[in-house]
Image: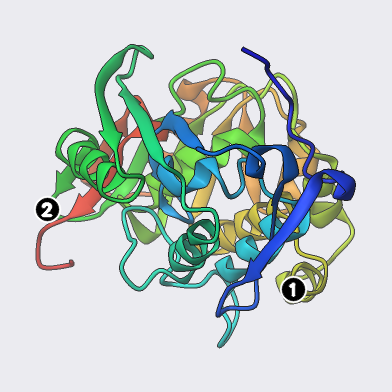
Amino acid sequence: MKVVDHDSRDDSNLTYVGTTSRKTEVFINKLALSYDHIIVSGGIVFHDLAGFGGGRKGIVPGIAGYKTVMQNHAHSLNPMGSGANPDVRSNLTDGNPFHEDLMEAVAFVNPSFLLNVLVDENGSIMHAVAGNYITAHQAGCEFLRSVDLSQIPFKAEVVVASCGGYPKDINFYQATKSLVNAIHACKLGGDILLLAECNEGLGNPEMEAIYHDFETNAQREAHVKEHYTIAKFFAYMTCVWAEEYKIHLVSSLDKDMMKRVGIDVYDSLDEALHVVHQRYDGAYHVYVMPSAGSTLPELTGEEA
């Protein structure tokens, strides 16, 4: 077996295979296309943008060109206004332009077979799906829904969320996956306490540039729309979320840096809890998410 590292920025190793109806130009690894069959492997998880990971994502972004990946990911922005596209979110594929664009792009390649696994909170394989790259992946997504969707009757004033430890909190870029899931359980204007060590900092210098080079979210959004990258998008959305919720981060990140975008950093959970408790006069509801990165709250009550 020969292992080849795909380089999305090396145009000499890419072949153009077509353009989707949403104008994503699809470039795929030339070597992969030279073989009779392509078998897609990977894991299925909830994905903030594509609805679910795994499946078609083994091709795009897996062996796609950088330009293809960025054009596809640009669908995460709201085309009719500010912020994120409301149809681009976790646990949603029907009507999700990000997912639908992926499916069109991968259809140019038409993989022969898929093998995807699902893992539990300890990283052990708990389920596997194999077969057609579309139907097998759909079956895996249904299984994931059955085990990792957590039904809640209402949103709480306070959500305490842990990324689940290393490597899920290796940097803030990775920690945003847990933050997104916590937002699903929190009332607008409520408090989110996120436990994320982030011993490797933000994880991408583009995030710090978005935080520090602009004074307003309108300026940040204009820049991201013009110069889209995934890291810039999530940095911008972090600033948006910090306006909509009170985010308390228990982390080793620089306090002054995060304060600039409206996020308070604490040295301990007790310190953060004390601050939050002072905000409420009387009883309030709290959800605790010990593995927030892999747990997606689903609202089932009257608020749904």
The percent coordinates of residue 199 (x first, y second) are: 70, 19
**Disc assigned to residue 225:** 1
Q: Position of residue 227 (x, y in %)?
A: 82, 67
For the N terminus, the quadrant is top right
Mark 2 burial class by Cα count in 10 Å: few <14, some 14-19, many 20+:
some
Q: Is residue 252 visible?
A: yes
Nearer-the-camera pick, 250 or 18: 18
Pick the residue in front: 121 or 138: 138
Position of 111 compared to 13: left or right? Answer: left
Does dot 1 land on a helix, a strand or a loop? helix
| Number of disc labels | 2
Q: Earlier in the sequence, mark 1 or mark 2?
A: 2
* Residue sticking out furthest to the front: 36
- In terms of secondary structure, where does tag 2 sit? loop
Residue 5 placement, left or right of 178? right
For the residue pair 182 and 78, the one nearer the viewer reads as 78
Q: CA distance from mark 1 to mark 2?
A: 36 Å
Q: Is residue 126 left or right of residue 31?
A: left
The amino acid sitting under disc 1 is Lys
Look at the picture and state if 70 lies above or below 121: below
Mark 1 surroundings within 10 Å by alpha-carbon count, few (fewer than 14), some (14 through 19), many (20 or more): some
Q: Which residue is mark 2?
A: 153
Where does the image place residue 243, in percent across and percent down from the top left? 57, 63
Name the image colouring.
Answer: rainbow
Image quarter where the C terminus lies is bottom left
Tag nearer the camera, 1 or 2: 1
